Every structure is written in structure tokens, then in C-alpha cells.
Image (cartoon, rainbow, N blue to C red):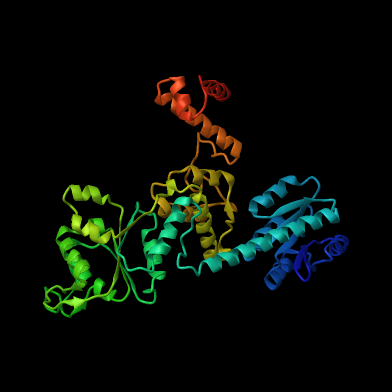
């Protein structure tokens, strides 16, 4: 790895150590500071990816208060700089405190130039990887699926479906619980379609009073009702050429269901108080968290309208069904929040307890709840790392899900054996048969897993 011309800030007040360190880091462009004020000035001027910081700075050369204060200010100015703190031989407590404040690593005196150089080069490598990752994230942000963070097979399948459906004009129904990102996916359908340069018009059918919803959707003529002082076009007509997103379509009043059905069939509308038919060319995307099949059975939703709005139906899985996505999304939300706040916050990430809590929680409010909790925790956190307490979550009594493949296989094997024995009421011959193994093999596995 080449370190030519890369800036390295060394904060050290001992002239002898300054010379030693400058020699140790000859592959870097080393800049020196011997106090907090100089260090902060050089950080602002050069924005080095890595710096070393002696915690024993004047006026507290025998303590660590000045060094720790410098560390906090450095990270508030340049949060991406990797800080390697240098401490006295018996000062491990302050080294640990510096790590808690956001330092990358620490090194205890006496200084071994070779080892310290390796630590600095490793910090530089991490800094470069993070920079590349940010660039990739920015490039990804140019995608029409921007804002959709997923690695789970369930959500990746949804994204692939969106990409396939988007270029068409078929009416699409998005089904999912509140907070799963239905509007985000509706926008992706629009942005990936030939209509992307036209309007995306969204209306929440549950948020507008029933007596106003008709005029909001279809518009009205002057004098159509008290207060209608001028002709006003509705959301459907306003979306002409683009995409109309009808959120919470399950809450659409029955009187309007027939009028919407006619529009979907004929692609013409009549304004309230009007007589003329107005043709509208619009792609319709609908969404709901309701179970429309139950509403149809209860007579609350028209079956013929359901078939019109569901030429393609896409089910969006809740967050609890998206293996591994909750932590991934939480990190993305925090990264976005930190980019927005910059140096105004000292938060840098999540501790392991928080990651475990995020993974184990069922997230009944889905991504919307996750976003609210992460942002609140980022505001309320006292240290550099967000804790489970900051998130107001607990994973008490639950163990982290294993990543070791042998452990995963063993747990799956034990669960399958217990299920088979339970299904056949302890009949070992039948259980062995459905498991595809012999009775002696099943007995061996039962003994291995402690199953009686």
C-alpha cells in the first residue's frame, strides 16, 4: 500500500519524541502540533485521514484531561479522522476512555516505532475503505431504488419485481404493514418507468375526510358547492402523463369505489359539478395495509375494483421477516443522520448490545419505528456509541442468533428431530422415516442432542 503524500498529523509536545515519530513515519507527509490549539488548526487546514495524539498535553502534561478534550474537539471537527491515542505505560484507564469517546486505537509508551507505524497504516487502510464505501453509497444513491436498504432474500425479490414491473403501465397493488415503505416502492415504480419525468402524485385515502375526498380526487367546477369559487382540477387530472399513488386504498369510501372503478375502466373522469368527460393518461399504483379479501367478504370493498387495481400485486414483507435487514437499515439511518448533522453530534455508531437488541426486536412499527428510535437514540446518547438503553430496547433473556455454520446446522437438525418426534407422538420408526434416516441413526442423533 502506498502512503506517499498522505497527510499524518502527530500531536506530541516532547521535542525528542517528535523527531523520533517523524522518522518513524517517513512514508507520510507528517505535520506536527504540540498543543490543542495547533492541533485543531492543522485538522481544519489539512483534514488528515489519520492522526496520533499524546494524551499528556500541556497544561496537563502529567494527566490526560487536555488530551481527551483535544480528542473530542478533533472528532467534532473531523469525524472521519482515525485518531490513535498515545498514553503512558500505566494509563490504560484513560486509553479505554479515549476509545469510548471515539478514538480508533491506542498505544502505550515506551514507543516502538515499528509497531506504532503498523497501527497507523492499519488506521489509514480502514479510513480508505470507509471512503470507498461512502463513494459507493453515493453512487448507489443515484439509483431509482434509492432509499431501499435490503440484503434479505425476501426484500431483494421485491426489488427485482419492482424493476420488472416498472417499465409497464399495469395497475399495481402494494400490500404491506404500516411502515414497510410502500410509498418508497411506489416512487421507485415511477422513477424506473418511462413516466419518470412527469409528476408522481400521492394521496392518502384515509387521511382526507370522506366529504372532501371526491373533490380532491376528481376536482370540481366553479359553483359546484358552497365555497367552490373557481374551477379546480383533482389529483387524478393533475397526475396526467405521470403516476397516481393511492395510499390506503382499503379505506376508500364505497361511494367513491364505483367512480374510481369507472375511471380505471374508461380512463376518463368528470369533475364534481361537471358534465363533460375528461380523458386522463395516468399510471395507477395503489397500496394498503388492510386485508382486502376480508373486506370483500364483509361487503366493504368491491370485488371488481380489487381485480382492477391488482393486475400486479406485490407483498412487502414486514421487517421481522427480513433476516438481517434491521441492523443494516439501522446503520444506514444513522449514517444518513450523521451526514446531516456533521460535527453537531459525537455519536459514531452502535455498541454490540444495541446491535443485538436491534436484531432481536420484532419491530411492530417496521422501518418507520426503527427510524424514529435510531434518530431519538442519536440525540439522547451520551457517548460515541449508541446503546440498547438509548434505543429503549432490551434483548434480555435472548441469545444472539449464531453465525457459526456448525452451530446453525446442529440447531436446525435438533429442531427437525424434535418436530418429527412430536408429529408422530414419539413413534421413532415413523419419525426416522419422514426424516429420511434409519432408526439407529435417529437414536444416535437423539443421544447427541440430548433428546429423550
Q: Quadrant of the N terminus?
A: bottom right
- The one nearer the camera, 449 or 402, is 449
The correct choice, above or below, for 311 with respect to 6 in the image is above
Tell me, yes or no, if residue 22 can be seen here.
Answer: yes
- The one nearer the camera, 451 or 349, is 451
Count of picture labels: 0
Q: Is residue 289 left or right of residue 438?
A: left
Residue 15 screen position, x and y as percent: 86, 63
The correct choice, above or below, for 370 with respect to 308 in the image is above
- The one nearer the camera, 20 or 270, is 270
Q: Is residue 123 left or right of residue 203?
A: right
What residue is rendered at 42% in x and 24% in y?
422
Q: Is residue 277 left or right of residue 388?
A: left
Residue 75 screen position, x and y as percent: 64, 61
The correct choice, above or below, for 95 with respect to 43 in the image is above
Tell me, yes or no, if residue 79 can be seen here.
Answer: no
Q: Quadrant of residue 286?
A: bottom left
Residue 377 screen position, x and y as percent: 50, 52
Q: Is residue 445 left or right of residue 84?
A: left
Residue 237 screen position, x and y as percent: 24, 75
The correct choice, above or below, for 153 with respect to 445 in the image is below
What residue is rendered at 17% in x and 47% in y?
298
Amino acid at each position: 500500500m502506498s502512503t506517499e503524500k498522505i497527510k499524518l498529523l502527530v500531536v506530541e509536545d516532547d521535542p525528542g519524541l517528535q523527531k523520533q515519530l517523524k522518522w518513524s513515519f517517513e512514508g507520510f507527509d507528517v505535520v506536527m502540533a504540540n498543543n490543542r490549539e495547533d492541533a485543531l488548526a492543522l485538522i481544519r487546514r489539512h483534514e488528515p485521514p489519520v492522526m496520533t495524539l499524546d494524551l499528556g498535553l500541556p497544561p496537563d502534561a502529567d494527566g490526560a484531561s487536555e488530551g481527551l478534550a483535544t480528542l473530542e474537539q478533533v472528532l467534532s471537527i473531523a469525524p472521519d479522522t482515525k485518531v490513535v491515542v498515545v498514553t503512558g505505560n500505566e494509563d490504560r484507564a484513560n486509553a479505554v476512555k479515549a476509545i469510548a469517546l471515539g478514538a480508533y486505537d491506542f498505544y502505550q509508551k515506551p514507543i516502538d516505532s515499528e509497531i506504532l507505524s503498523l497501527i497507523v497504516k492499519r488506521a489509514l487502510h480502514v479510513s480508505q475503505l470507509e471512503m470507498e464505501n461512502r463513494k459507493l453509497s453515493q453512487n448507489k444513491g443515484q439509483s431509482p431504488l434509492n432509499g431501499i436498504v435490503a440484503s434479505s432474500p425476501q426484500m431483494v425479490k421485491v426489488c427485482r419485481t419492482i424493476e420488472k414491473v416498472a417499465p409497464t403501465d399495469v395497475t399495481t397493488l402494494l400490500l404491506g404493514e404500516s411502515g414497510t415503505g410502500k410509498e418508497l416502492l411506489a416512487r421507485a415504480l415511477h422513477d424506473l418507468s418511462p413516466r419518470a419525468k412527469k409528476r408522481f402524485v400521492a394521496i392518502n385515502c384515509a387521511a382526507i375526510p370522506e366529504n372532501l375526498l371526491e373533490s380532491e380526487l376528481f376536482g370540481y367546477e366553479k359553483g359546484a358547492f358552497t365555497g367552490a369559487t373557481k374551477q379546480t382540477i383533482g389529483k387524478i387530472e393533475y397526475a396526467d402523463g405521470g403516476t397516481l399513488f393511492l395510499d390506503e386504498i382499503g379505506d376508500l369510501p364505497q361511494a367513491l369505489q364505483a367512480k374510481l372503478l369507472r375511471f380505471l375502466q374508461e380512463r376518463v373522469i368528470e369533475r364534481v359539478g361537471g358534465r363533460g368527460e375528461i380523458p386522463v393518461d395516468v399510471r395507477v399504483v395503489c397500496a394498503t395495509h388492510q386485508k382486502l379479501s376480508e373486506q370483500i367478504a364483509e361487503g366493504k370493498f368491491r370485488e371488481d375494483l380489487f381485480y382492477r387495481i391488482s393486475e400486479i400485486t406485490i407483498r412487502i414483507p414486514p421487517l421481522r421477516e427480513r433476516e438481517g435487514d434491521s441492523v443494516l437499515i439501522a446503520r444506514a439511518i444513522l449514517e444518513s443522520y450523521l451526514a446531516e448533522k456533521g460535527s453537531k453530534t459525537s455519536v459514531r455508531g452502535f455498541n454490540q448490545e444495541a446491535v443485538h437488541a436491534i436484531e432481536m426486536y420484532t419491530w411492530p412499527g417496521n422501518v418507520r419505528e426503527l427510524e424514529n428510535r435510531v434518530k431519538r437514540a442519536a440525540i439522547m446518547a451520551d457517548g460515541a456509541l449508541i446503546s440498547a438503553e438509548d434505543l429503549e430496547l432490551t434483548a434480555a433473556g435472548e441469545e444472539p442468533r449464531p453465525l457459526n455454520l456448525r452451530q446453525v446446522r446442529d440447531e436446525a437438525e435438533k429442531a427437525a428431530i424434535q418436530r418429527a418426534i412430536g408429529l408422530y407422538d414419539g413413534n421413532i420408526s415413523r419419525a426416522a422415516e419422514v426424516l429420511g434416516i434409519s432408526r439407529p441413526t435417529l437414536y444416535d442423533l437423539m443421544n447427541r442432542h440430548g433428546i429423550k
